[in-house]
Amino acid sequence: MSSSVPKPRCLQRPFVAPRLHMFGPGPSNVPTRILQAGAQPIIGHMHPEMFEIMDDIKSGIQYAFQTRNSMTFAVSGTGHTAMECALVNAVEPGESVLAAVNGIWGERATNVAERIGARVNTIAAPPGGTFILQEIEQALSRHRPMVFFVVHGESSTGVLQPLEGIGDLCRKYKCLLLVDSVASMGGTPLYMDKLGIDILYTGSQKVLNAPPGTAPISFSQRACQKALNRKTKPVSFSLDLTWLANYWGCDGAPARMYHHTGPVSAFYSLRESLAVLSEEGLENSWERHRTAAEYFHNGLESMGLKLYVKDKNARLPTVTTIVAPLGYDCYEIRSYLMKTHNLEISGGLGPSFGLVLRVGLMGCNSSKANVDMVLRALKDALEHCHRSKM
Amino acid sequence: MSSSVPKPRCLQRPFVAPRLHMFGPGPSNVPTRILQAGAQPIIGHMHPEMFEIMDDIKSGIQYAFQTRNSMTFAVSGTGHTAMECALVNAVEPGESVLAAVNGIWGERATNVAERIGARVNTIAAPPGGTFILQEIEQALSRHRPMVFFVVHGESSTGVLQPLEGIGDLCRKYKCLLLVDSVASMGGTPLYMDKLGIDILYTGSQKVLNAPPGTAPISFSQRACQKALNRKTKPVSFSLDLTWLANYWGCDGAPARMYHHTGPVSAFYSLRESLAVLSEEGLENSWERHRTAAEYFHNGLESMGLKLYVKDKNARLPTVTTIVAPLGYDCYEIRSYLMKTHNLEISGGLGPSFGLVLRVGLMGCNSSKANVDMVLRALKDALEHCHRSKM
C-alpha cells in the first residue's frame, strides 16, 4: 500500500497566535510566567518529580478552595469534565439530583446528570436572579435529592449566588452540596469547608490564568463516603474517583498505580498559576477583583449603560453582564472591539443570548488600568458602530 | 470569615523540570519547537483563528491516519479519553462488544465497555502474541458484536497486531472495527481507509512528540451512521459525538456552537506536532522507526539480551520489550539508568509486569544515535547493578 491521502498544505504555514486582550468570560490571558512553566521539558507522568508537582497542585487547590479535604486534585479536562467527574462519582443511576438553574451551567448539570441515569428535578430562577434559602429548603424537602447542584458564579448571566446557609440545609436533608465555581473561584470569597460544600470544582482558564484543560476539584469526607461506597461502578473509567484518588496520592495507599497519562505540561502551568495566586494571597485577590469590578460597574453606569444584574450584591466581580445597548447590534460592537482594539468581549450565552455583552476581567486581567481600557474601547465602539433609529 | 487554610510553602519553590531522555513507552521527548508552539499566547476557543487551527489539526490527522473521513478531530483528553469517546458513542447499553485482549489495553477497553452497560466478550492471546484472522472470524461469528476492539500497538507487551483482513471480516459480520493505535500511529504503516477501520484513535504523547492531553480520533461513515442514530444519549456530555462534530466543524452546520472550552495551548502543540510529521512524510517516519528498531533489536541480541516478542514481524517498532535480564532486579536497572544517565526506560505493565524492560523510541527519539545511547547505558547498567548468583 502507498500513501494516498496527501500532505496537507495548511500545515506548511507557521502559526503565530495574535496577541489579544482576553476580556471575555474565559479563557483569560495567561501571563508569560505561566506559559513558560508549561513549556518546560516533559517528564514522566509517574516520575517522583511529577508526584511532587501533583502534591504541590493539591496543596495549592486546598489553599484556593480553603479546604482541608485530602481528596483534592485536578481533573485532566476542563470545568465540564470536572462537572461530569463530580456527578458520575456522587450519583448512581436512579438516584435523585436537584439542580438550581439560573443560567447555562445549571442546564448543563441537568443534562449531564440525566445522561448517567439520575432522576433530575430543578428549581429555576429567572436569568439574572439568585436563589434564596427558603426556596432551596422547600425543594430539598420536596425532592429529597442525593445531590444538590448550584452555581456560585453563573458566567452566562453574571450572577453571584450567595452560598451561606445552603451547606446546613443540605446536611439537614442529608444531601451532598455540589458547587460550580468555575467563574468565581479566586475572584470572590469562597470557603469550601466553612460553607459545608461537599464537592467543589473550578477551571484553570479563568481567575487562575492558566491555559484551559485542567480543573481543580475537591470532595469532602461525606462526598467520599458516598462516592467510594457505591453499588455500581461509575460509568467513566477515566473519571472514576477510586482510580483518581490513587493516582493523586489521596487514598493513603503506599504506591500510585498507572491510571491515565496526566497532561504533564498542563500540570506545570496549573502549578505555576496556583503559585501566583498564593503569592498574592487569596484575600488580596478577592479585594482586587471587588475593587476593579465596582470601578468598572460605576464606569459603565456613568456611560449610560445598564447592568443586567439589578441587585448589586448579586453581581459577579469576575464576569460583568451589560444589557445590550439599545439600537446597536452586539455582534458589530464585539467585532469592532476585536478589529480595532484587539480586545475580546463576549455576547450572551444560553438564557442571556442576544440580551447582553459579557466582559470578564479575571486574575491578572482584573485591574483599574484594564477597566479604563475596556471603558475607552466601549465608548469608541458606541461612537463608531451603527445605531438604528429608535 | 477569614482565611484559615494557610498558603502552602511548597509553592514558593520554583519548579525546574529535569532534562531527561524519555525512552519509556510515553510520554516521549517534546522538541523545543513543539513546546514553544504550546507557549504562544492564548486565544479564544471560539475565535476564527482557533477554528482554523482546529481545521489544520483535522487535515493533519486525516493525513496521519490516511483517511478521508470528515468526522476527524482531536479529543480533549488522553488516549484513554479517546477510547471512552469511541465506545461511549458507538455502543448503546445492552449492545455487544468483542474485545481482543493480549495486553493491558484490551483489558481497559473491556472495563470501559462494561461500565457503559455493554455486553462484553473477549478473545485472548497470550502476552507477546497476536491474533490470527481465523480466530477473529470464529469469535465474530459466535458473538455477533456491534463493535470489535483490537489494539494495533500493544505497548504493554511490545506487540504489533497485523490488521490486514480484519476490516473485511467486520463488514461480513456487520460490526464496527475499533482500533487503538496510541503506541503505533506514525511509527509503522497504518492506512485507516484501506484497512476498513471504522474508528481509530491515538495519543499526542507518543510518536507525535506533543505533550500528553489530546487524542486524535476518526470515525468512518459506517461508524457515524451508528453513533449519530442512537436510541439513547451517550452517557457523557463531554464526549457526545453530535456536540463534538459541531464544535470541530465536521457536521456541515453553518455555525459552531459552544460545547466545551478546548485546551487551546494543547491544540497549538498538537498542530505543530502534526506539521512536523507532515514535513518528514509518513513513509519516511515509518521507515526511520523500522530501521532504528531493527538496529536496536540486533544490538540487544548481540548483548545477550532476549526480546519478549518471539515473532520478528510482530515486534512493535516504537516500543521494545526486553525479557528481564536473569539475576537482575529490573527496578534497580531502571533506577540506575535514571540516576546515572538521566534516561527513562520502563518496567512491565499489566500482563508483562515484572517480566520485561520496556524501551520506547518514538518520533524524534527514534534514531541510530539514541539506540547507541540506550545500548551503552544498558551495558553500563548490567555491569554495575547487583546480580544474584544463579
Image: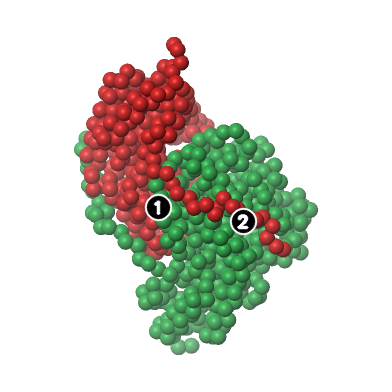
Chain colours: A red, B green
Classify residue A253 by image quadrant.
bottom left
Q: Chain of mark 2?
A: A
Q: Residues within 10 Å of mark 2 (few under 14, many from 20)?
A: many
Q: Residue at x 39, y 47 (%)?
A: B41
Residue that lies at the very extreme toward the top in this rendered image: A390
Disc 2 secondary structure class? loop
Q: Residue at x 39, y 75 (%)?
A: B341
Question: Mark 1 or mark 2, which is nearer to you?
Answer: 2
Disc 1 secondary structure class? loop
Task: Please state which amino acid type lies under the numbered disc 2.
Answer: Lys
Residue that lies at the very extreme toward the right in this rendered image: B172
Q: Residue at x 55, y 35 (%)?
A: B256
Judge left or right: residue A344 versus residue A367: right
Judge left or right: residue B323 versus residue A35: right
Residue B297 location (% of width, % of height): 57, 78
Q: Residue at x 39, y 29 (%)?
A: A358
Residue that lies at the very extreme toward the left in this rendered image: B2
Foreground residue, A22 or B246? A22
Foreground residue, B137 or B17? B17
Q: Chain of mark 1?
A: B
Task: Please state which amino acid type lies under the numbered disc 1.
Answer: Ala
Question: Which image quadrant: the N terminus of chain B?
Answer: top left
Judge left or right: residue B140 versus residue A241: right
Residue A217 location (% of width, % of height): 38, 44
Residue underneath mark 2: A7
Residue A140 location (% of width, % of height): 41, 27
Residue underneath mark 1: B39
Foreground residue, A31 or A176? A31
Residue A353, above or below B360:
above
Residue A203 location (% of width, % of height): 39, 42
Q: Can you see residue A383? A: yes
Q: Can you see residue B125? A: no
